[in-house]
Amino acid sequence: MVGVHDMEPYVPVQNFRHQRIERTPACGNRVQDFRAISLSFNSVLDGFNLPAYSADTIEHFLFVSKYMSQEPPPNSLDSIPHMVYTSEEFSLLIEICHPVTTKRLVIGQVSVCIGCCCGQTDRGKPAVPVDWLKAEWRRRGLLKNIQLTISGCLGPCDVPNIVLIATAGENVWLGNVDRFEYYREIVEWATLSKAAGRMLPLSRDLLGHRLDPFK
């Protein structure tokens, strides 16, 4: 019969051996548990069933995430395809999409180049009557309707005296505006356009100087 004192040294040894044997499988189980978590996460993403087209994927994901949360974030645009807005909400949406506005609306802008080549009479280029243009624009009250900009280099530099006329509909480039009479025609055209409230067609003489620097 084994006494109590005979069992005391045996029990601690057994416990120690049992703990050491169980440690190695526990480490392996940690790796297996990590893989199980990864597979579970992939299964969650599989539930989204996102389409292959990237734009639709983003839209679909935002649509799902919107309904997963209780309240959408403020000023969020992810619900645009899925909601009908009141006039007040639509006005707020426009302000968000176009945060910069101006009250000084114009019907056009005339940019006159006096850069590296244009107007440089010391280099044999035709003169640009800058002071006369500014004075006429002020005298005729054109600035509030048609903006005049005396610009640096507009290019192309192989064509002297460039004038760019920009409107909401198109940009008209004029090149080789080498005579004072052409600038006078531009002023007269701007005056008539102001009275009409819209940019009128240019004269035949000015259209004869039209160019396209992008072709």
Image (spheres, grey):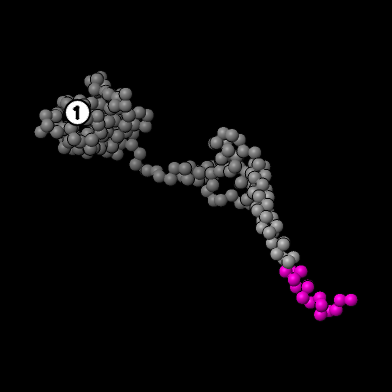
Residue 192 in sight here: no
Image quarter of the C terminus: top left
- 114 sits left or right of 215 in the view: left
Residue 151 in sight here: yes
Name the spot of residue 166 as percent of width and height, x first.
31, 32
Residue ID at (61%, 46%)? 65
Name the spot of residue 154 as percent of width and height, x first.
25, 33
In this view, the residue in front, 5 or 195, is 5
Residue ID at (55%, 36%)? 54
Rate crowding at label 1 as few (under 14), some (14 to 19) or many (20 or more) other CA atoms within 10 Å: many
- The kind of residue on which mark 1 rests is Pro
Name the spot of residue 24 as percent of width and height, x first.
68, 59
Which residue position is annotated with label 1?
A: 160
Give the total of numbered labels.
Answer: 1
Q: Examine the image and state in which quarter residue 150 appears.
A: top left
Residue ID at (47%, 42%)? 97
Range drawn in magenta: 1-16
- 17 sits left or right of 157 in the view: right
Name the spot of residue 44 as percent of width and height, x first.
66, 46
Using the image, determine if residue 74 lies above or below residue 4. above
Image quarter of the N terminus: bottom right
Q: Residue furthest bottom?
A: 5
Magenta-drawn stretch, dominant element (helix, strand or loop): helix
Q: Residue furthest right?
A: 1
Q: Examine the image and state in which quarter residue 204 appears.
A: top left
